[in-house]
Image: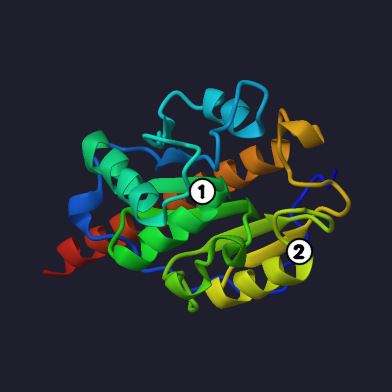
């Protein structure tokens, strides 16, 4: 398994920071939002492992994980964020959860989610949803990790969606669907992405604070 994200073949979209009202006072870094796919992510799944690495992580829980209802799944993402209170987020989605998250971001361009990681997305055409998903950049940095032999989405299709969304793209090779059944319990690559996203947020906030100080001394 690769130890770092390969060079991307699709550029990330420029990021416009959420407005000040979305920031938690004193927040050191964005919280982690886990968006599982169909049938949820069980105890042996890498998303569960990743969630356990961060005390401030939240999981989106669907009322029925067996029914791939795009609107209801996107609504649950919005509900989870609303109930969790103000603040920035980074989101890590898997399989059908990737489609729900992309749909949610299309509906909520001012979402407090500042960065996104899509892992092994499900093929929208399998659900008749291609036209309901965004076909343009998502308005925030994103990365998409796929495999060469995922039965849920071909590598060529994954690259097409990454290009549409402005996501960096990584192909892990012949590893299947990137789930527990394919041997992905601990997934250090996902954790490194989370740490890098939080570091980018911290740098952005330091730059914002420095700009405010410069302005205050100039008036």
Residue identifier under label 1: 97
State which tag comes first along the sequence, 1 or 2: 1
Looking at the image, which residue is at 42% across and 35% down? Answer: 64
Please give the name of the residue rendered at 35% of the width and 56% of the height, measured from the top-left corner.
71
Q: Position of residue 43 (x, y in %)?
A: 61, 21
The residue indicated by pointer 2 is 154
Q: CA distance from mark 1 to mark 2?
A: 17 Å
Q: Residues within 10 Å of mark 1 (few under 14, many from 20)?
A: many
Q: Measured along the vertical axis of the image, is residue 71 above or below residue 163?
A: above
Residue 197 is left or right of residue 111, and the answer is: right
Rendered residue at 56%/25% (across/down): 53
- Please determine whether, in this image, residue 21 is positioned above or below residue 158: above
Q: Residues within 10 Å of mark 2 (few under 14, many from 20)?
A: some
What quarter of the picture does the C terminus occupy?
bottom left
Instruction: Give 42 or 214, whichever is nearer the viewer.
Output: 42
Q: Nearer the viewer, residue 49 or 196?
A: 49
Q: Quadrant of residue 134?
A: bottom left
* Res 88 visible: no
Decide which of 107, 8 is in the foreground and name it.
107
Tag 1, which secondary structure?
helix
Is residue 97 left or right of 187 when viewed as pictured? left
Residue 191 placement, left or right of 6: left
What percent of the width, then of the height, locates residue 1? 85, 43
Q: Is residue 216 left or right of residue 68?
A: left
- What residue is drawn where x is 36% and y is 52%? 74
**Above or below: residue 142 compared with residue 22:** below
Residue 21, percent across and down? 17, 53
Asked whether residue 40 appears in the rendered view, the answer is: yes
Dots 1, 2 in contact, CB < 8 A: no
Q: What label sits on residue 85 in the rendered view? A: none
Return the x and y of residue 150 as percentages of the image width and height.
77, 53
């Amino acid at each position: 398994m690769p130890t770092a994200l390969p060079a991307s073949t699709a550029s990330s979209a420029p990021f416009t920071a959420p407005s000040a009202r979305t920031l938690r006072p004193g927040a050191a870094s964005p919280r982690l939002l886990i968006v599982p796919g169909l049938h949820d992510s069980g105890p042996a799944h890498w998303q569960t492992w990743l969630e356990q690495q961060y005390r401030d992580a939240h999981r989106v829980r669907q009322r029925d994980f067996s029914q791939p209802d795009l609107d209801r799944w996107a609504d649950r993402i919005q509900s989870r964020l609303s109930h969790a209170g103000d603040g920035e987020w980074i989101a890590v989605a898997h399989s059908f959860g990737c489609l729900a998250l992309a749909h949610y971001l299309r509906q909520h361009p001012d979402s407090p989610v500042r960065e996104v990681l899509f892992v092994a997305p499900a093929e929208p055409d399998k659900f008749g949803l291609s036209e309901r998903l965004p076909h343009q950049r998502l308005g925030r940095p994103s990365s998409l990790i796929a495999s060469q032999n995922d039965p849920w989405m071909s590598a060529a299709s994954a690259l097409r969606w990454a290009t549409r969304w402005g996501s960096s793209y990584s192909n892990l090779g012949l590893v299947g669907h990137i789930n527990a059944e394919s041997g992905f319990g601990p997934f250090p690559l996902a954790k490194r992405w989370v740490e890098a996203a939080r570091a980018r947020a911290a740098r952005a906030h330091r730059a914002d604070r420095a700009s405010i100080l410069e302005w205050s001394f100039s008036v």
